[in-house]
Amino acid sequence: MMFDYDIIIVGGCGRIGLPLGLAFADKGLSVCLYDVDEKAVETVSSGSMPFKEEDADEFLKRLIDNRLIATTNIEYIGRSEIVLIVIGTPVDELNNPDMVAVPSTVEEILPYMKDGQLLVLRSTIFPGSTRLVQNLLVESAKKIDLAFCPERIAEGKALSELTTLPHIISGVDACSIQRAKNLFETLATTIELTPEEAELAKLFTNSWRYIRFAIANQLFIIATKYSIDYYRVLNAIREDYPRAQDIPTAGFVAGPCLLKDTLQLAAYNNNDFPLGQAAVSINEGLPLFLVSTMLESFDLHNMVIGILGMAFKSESDDIRYSLSYKLKKILRFKSKEILCHDPYVTSDKSLVELSEVLERADLIIIGSPHSVYDDISFHQPVIDVWGKLQTN
Ligand SMILES: NC(=O)c1ccc[n+]([C@@H]2O[C@H](COP(=O)([O-])OP(=O)(O)OC[C@H]3O[C@@H](n4cnc5c(N)ncnc54)[C@H](O)[C@@H]3O)[C@@H](O)[C@H]2O)c1
């Protein structure tokens, strides 16, 4: 059967779908980005990136309307040989993972799918979802191959990592695996697992990182409670001592993946994941710890507090699950006024200029350590959990 496009990406204008589409189009494949977000589709179609991603502006300008289109029209699903799903899989306000986000999207697009297509799940999914989707395909009686190939890039570095990191691939049968392998080998090397292994591989990777950062945050909290500078201790431990090089700095650990995937793994294992759950408590508790420590030294209720960096990590414009916002909420009850700045975040209209924060704040907290803050001479005290200002 002939198709008009090689690939359609469902969620194609999101943080993961768009760079992936750019990478495939850059390798010569024809790509359709399908998304329900009309504004994002419009922005992408006009050749502009809806968010910050290294090198993506140049890729998009070069590729849009030339091997790459964006659409909100679901009927394009039937016009592509490969249908790749990379929608968001968030947790709700009670921290429950949305287990059915991907299977529900499959049900939504299935009426438009055709025999001979390959369906690739690329979102991070609740374990067991690939088999659930396989059952949906069987029930539909359509002859569609199915693969699960989790995304492993870090936002901001997507375009370089997509073509350098190996892609984990899995499929429900030999043909699905071969087709997934052929697809991802256009970008980089591949590693084959079963769907069940691949589902866990993704959750293990992110839980591992989340717990690692939590250990550093707990050590930071212990040191601070005893009025000891964590970074003097950390630097001494690391100096010329290879086994300690990988101890992380403390910091706000947030974003759309690490917390959510740790919670998914806990939910999968009947809520039995003590290390993961302790990590959630430590990482999510860090803003509260900072505020309670500040209350011991400062009269916060009569002070203007500045927060520098609202994105969930440095050099990013993504505020999803950012702990800077949690800090801001806590401080609303404890301080006179809060002024927030971020050089990259455009979605928050309450942010103010850096000069205003520097001029008016009595105390500053570094929320995310963007490099633009490195060389500032502060005239007020600065709380820098990242230890960045001390090492520069
Ligand atoms: N962001 C990361 O750093 C990262 C890294 C690795 C893996 N992941 C995983 O990748 C997946 C996507 O994450 P993201 O950060 O790109 O999310 P995102 O919210 O930025 O993008 C998802 C996109 O899907 C669109 N969408 C949602 N439902 C749709 C539907 N039914 N039909 C068509 N489009 C739909 C949204 O409009 C949005 O543009 C998640 O499962 C996430 O866990 C994310």
Image: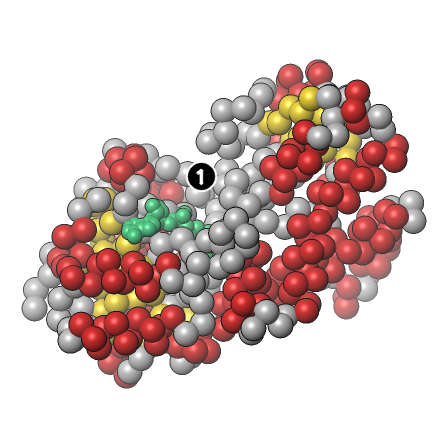
Instruction: Decide: is 308 above or below 114.
Output: above
Residue 334 appears left or right of 48: right
- Does any atom of ligand 1 lie closer than 8 Å to the CB of label 1? no
Residue drawn at point x = 71 percent, y = 43 percent:
287
Residue 186 appears left or right of 203: left
Which residue lies under the disc numbered 1? 52
**Residue closest to the far front:** 94
Compare residues 186 and 120 and report the one nearer the observer: 120
Residue 254 image position (x, y, % from top left): 59, 49
Residue drawn at point x = 86 percent, y = 47 percent:
224
Q: Quadrant of residue 371?
A: top right
Residue 369 image position (x, y, % from top left): 65, 39
Compare residues 175 and 55 and report the one nearer the observer: 175
| Amino acid type indicated by mark 1 | Lys
Visible in this render: residue 28? no
- Where disc 1 sits, the SS reads loop
Query: How many numbered discs sit on the rendered protein?
Result: 1
Residue drawn at point x = 15 percent, y = 59 percent:
112
Figure quadrant of the C terminus: top right
Q: Residues within 10 Å of mark 1 (few under 14, many from 20)?
A: some
Compare residues 129 and 119 and report the one nearer the observer: 129
